[in-house]
Amino acid sequence: MATTDPSTTQVVLDLLGIFVFSISGALVAVRKGLDVFGVLVLAGTTGLGGGFLRDVLIGATPPAALADWRYLIVPVAAGLLGFVFHPVVGRMERSINVLDAFGLGLFCVTGALKALDYGLGPVPAALMGMVTGIGGGMIRDLLASRVPLVFRGELYATPALAGAFVVVGLAHTDLSYWTVALIGGGLCTTWRLLAIWRHWQAPVPTGPASV
């Protein structure tokens, strides 16, 4: 199994990912004209939703978001930051998209490794890594009355799944936790950034739909 202290490392990676995703959720809420409570709800949903789903599905109860106060403070802080400084943060959207790609990479790593720790096999663990990365954004978009990003042709879920599979494949080697995270998360993040830069899209139907 990957060496180093996984518990501390996993918490650090989780909190970084939560902060990045919570900022993106806050920006969506601001653009929808929601009040401060709505901004905090969408920030928290985006940052915590994927990890919450993962923990419930793998039986890690109570979920980390409810068992550790840090998991609640981070999205609140990010939501307030997005609400108060939204003109500045909004102008940084390109940078936010870059940070979001890093958040996706972080979450696919922590989701897959935590699922392995709870006894899941390689394929289910990789799926949990993907769910951790995309779950919060899907819930955010549904609450904001938007078609979820992962259903709109964006290469988002695929990089997360690929990164999670790499993590699962390397988890039982002698590589350190950080090395496994760097390789798997790096693949996911790089793929996502290239998709944004090169405007890569997943295949979507063409022509009118038949009834």
Image (cartoon, helix red, strand yellow):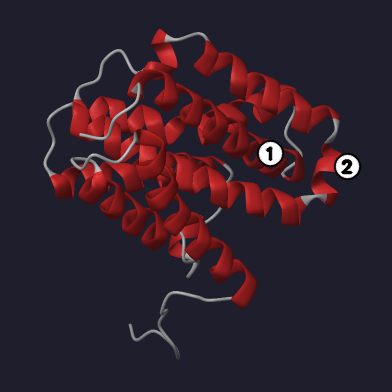
**Which of pointers 2 and 1 lies earlier in the amino acid sequence?**
1
Q: Residues within 10 Å of mark 2 (few under 14, many from 20)?
A: few
Asked if one can make out residue 135 in the rendered structure from this viewpoint, the answer is no
Q: Which amino acid type is shown beneath numbered disc 2? A: Pro
Task: Name the quadrant of the C terminus.
Answer: bottom left
* Mark-to-mark CA distance, 2 and 1: 13 Å
Please tell me whether mark 1 sits on a helix, a strand or a loop. Answer: helix
Q: Residues within 10 Å of mark 1 (few under 14, many from 20)?
A: many
Please tell me whether mark 2 sits on a helix, a strand or a loop. Answer: helix
**At which x and y percent is residue 89?**
81, 42
**At which x and y percent is residue 145?**
56, 48
Q: Which amino acid type is shown beneath numbered disc 1? A: Ala
Left or right: 59 in relation to 179:
left
Give the residue furthest to the front: 174
**At which x and y percent is residue 92?**
80, 50
Asked if labels 1 and 2 touch by Cβ distance under 8 angstroms, the answer is no
Residue named by callout 1: 29
Image depth: mark 2 or mark 1 in front: 2
**At which x and y percent is residue 63?**
34, 18
Above/below status of 123 relative to 88: below
Which residue is at a point 47% across and 29% down the rendered structure image? 14
**Label of residue 87 in the image:** 2
Residue toward you, 144 or 149: 149
Which residue is at a point 53% across and 41% down the rendered structure image? 140
